Image: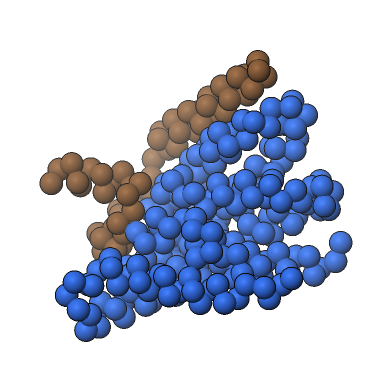
Amino acid sequence: MMPAVIFVTVMVVLFLGTFMLNKNTPAPVDYKISAARCSACSHYGCALKQEEAEES
Amino acid sequence: MSWTVFFVAIFSSMLINNVVLMKFLGVCPFLGVSKKTGSALGMSAAVMFVMVIAAFVSYLLYYLVLVPLEIEFVQTISFILIIASLVQLVEMIIKKISKKLYKSLGVYIALITTNCAILGIAVENITRDFAGQYGLFPGLAVAVTTAFGAALGFGLVMFAFSTIRERLEGANVPEAWKGVPVSLITAGIMALAFAGLGGIVG
């Protein structure tokens, strides 16, 4: 059981590490999400859509 | 191991066991990101990118870490975490190395974390025991080929479905059927068409 707990902990730490690294990596300077492409998507997992829903 | 194995792996995972229409995995992006052909192709490219890498990494993780440690029961949670980490890593690398690629795939990469088709293919590669059938590394090649075929199949149905939905927007559809209902009926008919391919490879 112990190796499983250690392994899962390592995986969680790995995920958190990559998440933080990605969050701290700036997007290209002139990058802007195209409104037309965004409106063509109704994916429920998208954070932008969730923010939109909360605002409205 | 002959080249036929790879051909069958691609053909079967792309058309006969299509990930969306036969296994009903990845239905969320199939319905959510198929309103416009451009978006559908962007999502398909991002899925292909991540699905192949995820199949490669999860296969090695299972046989080189989980099996020797005898902790195969954490397979699902470890695959979920490895896919989530991969998505973050791929997004970060794309941000750094290619502005053009990030512009075309950036919106979709983050959504892939919630795409069950990626996890489904990673788990299926283990369930089908390619390592037992072909050996560890030849099995890895078959697993990656299967993932590539599945991603091609995902792209194919996304493209076909998005073109149909674009045409449906201008079609004379009864009021009650407009939007999601007619899209679901279309998806059902497409699934029936794909079911007709079953049994081609014995």
Instruction: Give percent across and percent down for residue A18.
Output: 50, 33
Letter of the chain in blue: B
Q: Residue furthest left?
A: A56
Residue B50 visible in the shown view? no
Asked where in the image residue A1 lies, by quadrant, the reply is top right
Q: Which quadrant would the N terminus of chain B be assigned to in this image?
A: bottom right
Looking at the image, residue B25 sits to the left or right of residue B176; the answer is right
Q: Residue furthest bottom?
A: B172
Q: Residue at x 74, y 25 (%)?
A: B69
**As displayed, is residue A41 above or below residue B7?**
above
Task: Estimate the x, y position of residue B180 in percent, counting from the top left.
Answer: 28, 66
- Compare residues B162 and B183 and report the one nearer the observer: B183
Q: Position of residue B104 (x, y in %)?
A: 42, 60
Q: Is residue A40 left or right of residue B66?
A: left
Question: Residue B5 vs residue B195: left or right?
Answer: right
B8 lies above or below A49: below
Q: Residue at x 41, y 33 (%)?
A: A24
Q: Residue furthest top?
A: A2
Q: Residue at x 19, y 46 (%)?
A: A53
Task: Tell me if B136 is positioned left or right of B174 in this view.
Answer: right
- Image coordinates of residue B164 in percent, x first then y, are 37, 77
When asked about the image quadrant of residue B62, the answer is top right
Q: Which chain is brown?
A: A
Looking at the image, is B59 positioned above or below residue A16? below
Q: Is residue B42 visible?
A: yes
